[in-house]
Structure formats: C-alpha cells, structure tokens
Image (cartoon, rainbow, N blue to C red):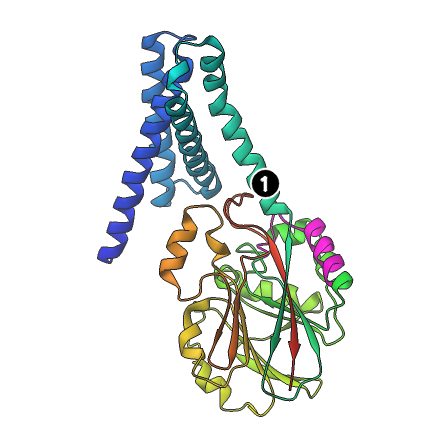
C-alpha cells in the first residue's frame, strides 16, 4: 500500500477521535442533570467503542455497510458544528451565565442547531437550483440551448421522482440538447431495476438528443449492465467516441479514468473536424488545463459534487484547477457542476443539487 494511503488513514483516524471527543463533551454537558456521572462515563466508553469499530471495520472492508459509517461521520461533523454554535453563544452571552432563561436557551441550542443542519442538508440534496449561463464561441453555430445534469447516482434514495422532475425542468427550459456527464447509477443497477426507473429515465428528451458518458461509479463492477440499461432508456452513450450532431457540432464523450486503456483526448480529436464547434463530456475535471490548449470549445464535467458536505469543498478546491463553476480558458468554456444527485447520504451542506442551462451563441 502506498504511503499516501497510510497518511489518509491516519488523518481520518485523528479527525474521527476529535469529533468523538467533541460529541462526548457536549453530550456530558447536555445530560449532566439527567443521568449520573457513572452512567455518563459508561455512555462515553460505549460511543467511542461502537463508532470506532463500525468505521474502521468499514474501512478495512470487514463490515460492508458504508452508508452506516457515512451517517455516523456526518452526524459527528454536524454535532461538532452544533457544539461550536453553542460555544460561541455561551461566549457572547457570558454576562447572563447565571440567568435561567439564558441557560435554557443554551441547552436548546445544540439539538435545534443539529436538527436545523440536517433539515437544510436534506433540502439542498433534493431541491435543484437551476443555473443559467450564456457563452459565445468563435465558430459558426445556430443558437443552441444545452441542459446539463450529472452525478445522478440512481439508487434507493434517488430515483424516478427526481428523474421526472429533471425531465420537467428540461422541458420548461426548452433545451435543444441534454448532456449527462457520468455517474448515472450508484455503483450498480439493482435499485434502478427494482424501482422500475427506466420509464422515468426515458422521459429525458430533447430535439437534438440526450447524450451520456460513464463516471467512476459506473465502473464499479456493473459496467456492462449499466451500459445496457442506459441505452435501453433511449440515451446515446458515448464511450471514448465522437459524433457530429445535426451537422452543427461535434460531441465527444470520454469514459472515466477507471476505464482500462482510455485514449487521451488528443487521440480522440484526430478524427474530429475541428472547424465545427467541439463539445466535450468528461466526467472528472482532471484535464481542464491540458484541454484548454486543445481545439475544444466547451467542456462539461461533474464528479466533485462541490464537496457535497462542507468542509469537503475545501479539499476539492485543492485537488482540481476548476473544482466547481465556470471558467473561460483560452478560447474554451469549462463547466463543472455540483451534480443533480448525491453520493452516500442524501445530504448537502455548502453545496446544492443543480441543473445547468447553457445558451451557446456562434459568430
């Protein structure tokens, strides 16, 4: 195992202990008048043992229930935020520390903040924000409206209802073309088939077609079935290939980095007429800088989820030159969306489900 994995494992372990310590201290304070000191100590030991056991056994793949570990980690993170809010309130109101009303307010601060964070996060995960962009390219092109949505992660917590809502959004916006740059399924098609999502996915329609690529989660062992189901729903799947759409522009779709023997973008461009506008779907925004030196007019990516839950967005900003949003580099326009769905837990904090509507104007 590489050294960096040991470092990551060590950092996770330290952060986990910090969060557990904060949660333990907060819980002791919150329960100090309700249970005995001995009972509080026993509860602390139980929490440390159970939480550490579940999370580390999950990391070691002995306990195959990732979502339970994810819920524990998010709960501890939100608990730390709530404890911090109570601490700040206590410092600001130290003059009233002997006031019964203030102490009661302080006691309610923790659970109310914790509940509020979860409610806000659920809202952000299931309420898409529609972002509009207008760009111009230096090539001949009729006005074109593109709808972009990535990272569905279709599964037990995100499915037919959300696909119907997305279809309604694209219909209302009257898009000409729909692009879905990866992570359509959440690792496999089990929930997709069980919940009979195909008719809902098939509702995504546009005059110039609906095109998709595969993301990293589409390569986690069920790739062939995912490819089959995507195509059965009427989507046009581009796997390291290009197509000229309606004689107006060329669209290239790249497989995710996990695909074996994935060709470089330069190789894909060799067979492309670059006098036409060139649009690229690339799930991960790894190669934005490199692509800015190539004849690419527009690129759409996802993958980062804008971190999904703060402070993960800080790390995605460090990892990618463009981790979220829009940037013009050279003559090309680059978009990284936070995604329409979510991964792991149905929560977003510091990010929101979103759909991009891009109006492209030629010369």
* Left or right position of 205 against 108: right
**Quadrant into which the N terminus falls:** bottom left
Name the residue located 76 percent from the left edge and 74 percent from the top edge: 207
Q: Residues within 10 Å of mark 1 (few under 14, many from 20)?
A: some
Whether residue 263 appears in this view of the structure is no
Residue on which the image places disc 1: 122
Name the residue located 25 percent from the left edge and 45 percent from the top edge: 10
Whether residue 85 appears in this view of the structure is yes
From the top left corner, tell me how far across and down residue 145 is, in percent: 69, 72
Above/below status of 352 relative to 255: above
Q: Which residues are magenta?
A: 152-170
Name the residue located 36 percent from the left edge and 59 percent from the top edge: 318
Element on which disc 1 rests: helix
From the top left corner, tell me how far across and down residue 67 is, in percent: 48, 41
From the top left corner, tell me how far across and down residue 52 is, in percent: 33, 33
In magenta stretch: residue 347: no
* Left or right position of 275 against 28: right
**Quadrant into which the C terminus falls:** bottom right
Camera-side residue of 261 and 283: 283
From the top left corner, tell me how far across and down residue 301 is, in percent: 52, 67
Above/below status of 202 relative to 176: above
Please identify the quarter of the rendering in which residue 204 is found: bottom right
Above/below status of 12 relative to 128: above
């Amino acid at each position: 195992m590489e050294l960096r994995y040991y470092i990551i494992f060590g950092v996770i372990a330290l952060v986990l202990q910090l969060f557990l310590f904060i949660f333990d201290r907060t819980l002791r304070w919150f329960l100090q008048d309700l249970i005995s000191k001995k009972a509080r100590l026993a509860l602390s030991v139980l929490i440390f043992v159970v939480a550490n056991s579940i999370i580390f056994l999950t990391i070691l793949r002995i306990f195959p229930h990732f979502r339970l570990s994810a819920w524990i980690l998010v709960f501890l993170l939100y608990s730390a935020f709530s404890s911090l809010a109570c601490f700040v309130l206590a410092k600001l109101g130290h003059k009233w520390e002997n006031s019964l009303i203030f102490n009661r307010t302080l006691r309610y601060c923790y659970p109310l903040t914790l509940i509020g964070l979860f409610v806000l996060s659920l809202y952000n995960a299931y309420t898409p924000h529609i972002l509009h962009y207008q760009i111009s390219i230096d090539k001949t092109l009729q006005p074109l409206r593109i709808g972009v949505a990535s990272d569905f992660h279709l599964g037990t917590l995100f499915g037919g209802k959300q696909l119907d809502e997305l279809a309604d959004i694209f219909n209302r916006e009257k898009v000409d073309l729909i692009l879905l740059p990866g992570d359509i399924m959440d690792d496999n098609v089990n929930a997709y088939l069980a919940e009979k999502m195909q008719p809902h996915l098939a509702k995504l329609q546009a005059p110039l077609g609906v095109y998709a690529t595969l993301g990293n989660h589409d390569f986690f062992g069920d790739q062939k079935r995912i490819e089959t189901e995507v195509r059965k729903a009427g989507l046009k799947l581009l796997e390291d290939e290009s197509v000229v759409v309606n004689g107006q522009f060329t669209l290239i779709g790249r497989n995710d980095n996990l695909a074996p023997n994935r060709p470089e973008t330069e190789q894909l461009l060799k067979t492309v007429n670059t006098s036409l506008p060139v649009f690229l779907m690339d799930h991960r925004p790894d190669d934005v800088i490199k692509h800015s030196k190539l004849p690419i007019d527009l690129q759409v990516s996802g993958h980062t989820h804008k971190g999904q839950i703060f402070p993960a967005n800080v790390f995605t900003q460090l990892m990618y030159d463009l981790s979220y949003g829009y940037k013009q580099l050279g003559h090309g326009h680059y978009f990284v969306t936070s995604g329409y769905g979510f991964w792991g837990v149905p929560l977003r904090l510091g990010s929101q489900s979103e759909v991009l509507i891009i109006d492209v104007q030629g010369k």
